[in-house]
Structures are given as structure tokens and as C-alpha cells.
Image (cartoon, rainbow, N blue to C red):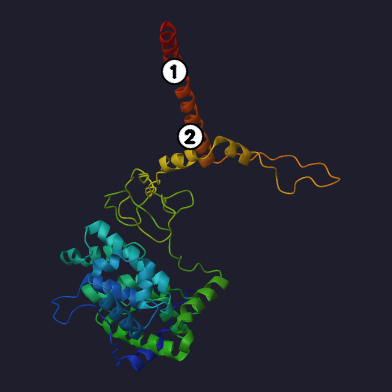
């Protein structure tokens, strides 16, 4: 016997209770917009997924304030999106990463961040395209189709299923996919907008009743399913990098032996739009700037030579041969003389003195033969007389 995931009687009672509720559904469209924007509806769906309309309104206001357009939101990193919507937003990082990958997938397919091309297609083609966007979940896909293209659908997420289970409406082992299929089968197209608004108000009421642990509703559902052996919805898949300029729809990348898309890059969060091999360029070696050395002062030697010429050579030799201090005393051997090396000035003085003495000697040697010849002539003349 097949058991329905939803108890129809209790579900009808819930609809009567919340049928008059008119929750404020947030939007990114300007008030004078002719038609709702598809990308705006997709971003709104991501903010409402496993959250409440009130939280989504606050997050969309922050996005509108911090970004210029949808393309700027697309190029932001996941951490930057988290900083905009707030780190305490329910499942903030997973939400930001799925939004980032979905927007980049739309851009790779259409070369712009827009879904306006879907308006000329039929409902079946629209639904196939939106549900095939990378990293999108059924709730966000259905919320995009309802908000932008008026499809008669009832978006369901894990938080809604857990709230229905808490009220005894949903079966404990009912999954989100089973509840979504049941809604599409039993809810008429004309009643879909009313049922959607009632479920939004019902989920928000359950969230308020849970208090600060409202974001734990989804985790409670998944924990219960895992204990029962039910395979929960897979987590965020690894990043799949397609070749440059491919235009291949999402989900058609080649798979490896483990059944996962091939990943040329190991980076877990960023989807590169183009992978270009660039040659490594070594930085130019810049020689350090050396300050010029200060000019060396020239030593004038001429006045030193003149002063040294006045001193006799003997005094210079005596000064260089002085004994060291603490000479020989009685009963002790005389200390050895320590010859100190003459300084530059002493050498210059000795050299000048030696040159001067050599000049005097040569002058005497030159004059002596002249004087002797003169004396010899005088003596010879005196003898002849």
C-alpha cells in the first residue's frame, strides 16, 4: 500500500487557517518595471530558500544598496556576498556559492546576465532551461518561474517540509522531492498562487515559534532522514570548469571514474570564465642605488717637506733609536730596544734632509777642482816673475 507524503485532511485545515494571509514577497524589480526580471526573481529565490520573506527583504535591500547591477553581483566573490547579506544569515556561505555559480552559468550561456530570452519560449522550454542552471535547487527554480514567468507551481524547500512534519501534516520520512511532486499533482493551477502564499505564511509562523533555532529546521529534517537510511539531497557539487568559449549547458561536462565532473583546477569556490596560459615573466633586477663616495681630501706634502728640511738628519736617526720605556735597572738585564716604524711625516723629513745634504756635497765636489786650478795658475805666475 502506497502512503502519501502529505495527509490531505490536515493539509486542507492548514490552508483554511492561512488562506487569508498575504505575506510580503520581496522583489528586486523597480516599481515602474513593465515585467519582472528573471535574474531578479532568481536572486530573490536564493534569498528566500530555507529562510523567511522578512529575512529575504533585508538581504535584498543590502544587495541593492551595495551593488550597481546584476553583473556586479555576479563577479563578487562568495565571501563578499556573505559580507553583504550578513554572516549570520541562514546557510550564508552555501547560499552565496550557489548564487555565484548560477549567475556565472547564465553568463556563459548567454554572454550576459539576463533571462529575457526565455520570454519568447514556451513554458516547457522555460522550465527545462531554469531547472538546468548550475547549482540551482528546485525551490529557487520554481520560485524564479513563478515570479518572472507566472508558472502555476508551489515551491517547496526543506524548512517547509519540516514545518509540515511538526504539525503532523507530512510523513516523517517524506522528502522534499516527494512533497513537491504531491503538490504538483493535487494542487490545481488556479489554486497554486493561494497555496504558495499560505505555505509561506505557515513556514514563517513555524520559524518564529522555533526562535533562534529556526535555521535548524532543515538540519533536523536531514538528520532524521540519514538515521532512517534515506539519501538526502546531495550537498554542493564540486566546481566543474568547462573549456573556453564552450556554451555547453550545465551538467553536460565529462565525468571521471567517481561520477563527478572533471576539475582541472583545485580551487573550491571560484568559477573561471576563461583559462588562459600566460608565460611566466621574471621581474627585472634593479641594481641598488649606491650613494657617491665623499671626495678624498688631498694631503699637501710641500710644507711638510720644507719643515723636515730644517731638521738635521742626525736628530731624526736618534729619535728613531730611542729605547722603550722602563729601561734597564740595577740587577736586571737591559730591555731590548723597540724600533718604532717612522711615520709618513718622519720619512718625508728624513728624505728631504738627505737630499739637501747630498746637494751640499755635490756643490763642494764641483767647486774644489776650480779653486785648485786657479791657485795653480797664480803660483805658476809668481814663479815666472
Residue drawn 33% across and 87% down? Answer: 198
Of residues 23 and 287, the one nearer the viewer is 287
Percent across and percent down for residue 37 are 20, 72
Which quadrant would residue 314 be assigned to in this image?
Answer: top right
Q: Using a 10 Å C-alpha cutoff, classify the residue at mark 1 as few (fewer than 14 neighbours), some (14 to 19) or many (20 or more).
A: few
Which quadrant would residue 280 be assigned to in this image?
Answer: top left
Percent across and percent down for residue 105 are 30, 60
Disc nearest the viewer among 2 and 1? 1
Residue 185 in sight in this render: no
Of residues 258 and 6, the one nearer the viewer is 258
Residue drawn 42% across and 71% down? Answer: 93
* Disc ID at residue 186: none
Residue 229 relative to residue 137: left or right: right
Percent across and percent down for residue 58 are 32, 83
Of residues 48 and 376, the one nearer the viewer is 376
* Disc ID at residue 371: 1
Residue 360 in sight in this render: yes
Q: Using a 10 Å C-alpha cutoff, classify the residue at mark 2 as few (fewer than 14 neighbours), some (14 to 19) or many (20 or more).
A: many
Residue drawn 43% across and 75% down? Answer: 91
Which mark is first along the chain, 1 or 2?
2
Residue marked by disc 2: 352
Of residues 204 and 171, the one nearer the viewer is 204
Percent across and percent down for residue 329 are 81, 47
Q: Provide the secondary structure element on which disc 2 rests.
A: helix
Amino acid at each position: 500500500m502506497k502512503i502519501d507524503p502529505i495527509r490531505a485532511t490536515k493539509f486542507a485545515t492548514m490552508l483554511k487557517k492561512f488562506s487569508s494571509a498575504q505575506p510580503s514577497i520581496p522583489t528586486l524589480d523597480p516599481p515602474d518595471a513593465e515585467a519582472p526580471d528573471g535574474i531578479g526573481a532568481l536572486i530573490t529565490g536564493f534569498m528566500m530558500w530555507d529562510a523567511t520573506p522578512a529575512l529575504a527583504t533585508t538581504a535584498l535591500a543590502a544587495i541593492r544598496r551595495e551593488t550597481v547591477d546584476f553583473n556586479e553581483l555576479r563577479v563578487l566573490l562568495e565571501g563578499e556576498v556573505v559580507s553583504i547579506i550578513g554572516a549570520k544569515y541562514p546557510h550564508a556561505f552555501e547560499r552565496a556559492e550557489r548564487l555565484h555559480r548560477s549567475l556565472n552559468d547564465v553568463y556563459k550561456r548567454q554572454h550576459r546576465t539576463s533571462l529575457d530570452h526565455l520570454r519568447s519560449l514556451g513554458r516547457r522550454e522555460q522550465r527545462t532551461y531554469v531547472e538546468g542552471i548550475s547549482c540551482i535547487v528546485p525551490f529557487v527554480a520554481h520560485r524564479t518561474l513563478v515570479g518572472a514567468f507566472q508558472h502555476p507551481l508551489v515551491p517547496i524547500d526543506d524548512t517547509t517540509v519540516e514545518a509540515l512534519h511538526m504539525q503532523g501534516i507530512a510523513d516523517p520520512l517524506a522528502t522534499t522531492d516527494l512533497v513537491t511532486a504531491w503538490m504538483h499533482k493535487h494542487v490545481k493551477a488556479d489554486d497554486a498562487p493561494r497555496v504558495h502564499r499560505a505555505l509561506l505564511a505557515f513556514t514563517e509562523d513555524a520559524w518564529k515559534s522555533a526562535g533562534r533555532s529556526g535555521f535548524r529546521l532543515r538540519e533536523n529534517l536531514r538528520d532524521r532522514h540519514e538515521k532512517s537510511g534515506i539519501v538526502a539531497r546531495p550537498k554542493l557539487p564540486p566546481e566543474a570548469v568547462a573549456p573556453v568559449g564552450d556554451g555547453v549547458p550545465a551538467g553536460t561536462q565529462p565525468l571521471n571514474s567517481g561520477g563527478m565532473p572533471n576539475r582541472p583546477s583545485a580551487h573550491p569556490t571560484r568559477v573561471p570564465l576563461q583559462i588562459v596560459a600566460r608565460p611566466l615573466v621574471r621581474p627585472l633586477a634593479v641594481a641598488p642605488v649606491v650613494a657617491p663616495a665623499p671626495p678624498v681630501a688631498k694631503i699637501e706634502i710641500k710644507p711638510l717637506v720644507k719643515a723636515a728640511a730644517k731638521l738635521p738628519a742626525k736628530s731624526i736617526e736618534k729619535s728613531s733609536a730611542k729605547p722603550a720605556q722602563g729601561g734597564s735597572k740595577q740587577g736586571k738585564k737591559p730591555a731590548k730596544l723597540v724600533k718604532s716604524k717612522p711615520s709618513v711625516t718622519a720619512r718625508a723629513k728624513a728624505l728631504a734632509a738627505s737630499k739637501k745634504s747630498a746637494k751640499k756635497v755635490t756643490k763642494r765636489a764641483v767647486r774644489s777642482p776650480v779653486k785648485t786650478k786657479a791657485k795653480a795658475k797664480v803660483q805658476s805666475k809668481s814663479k815666472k816673475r
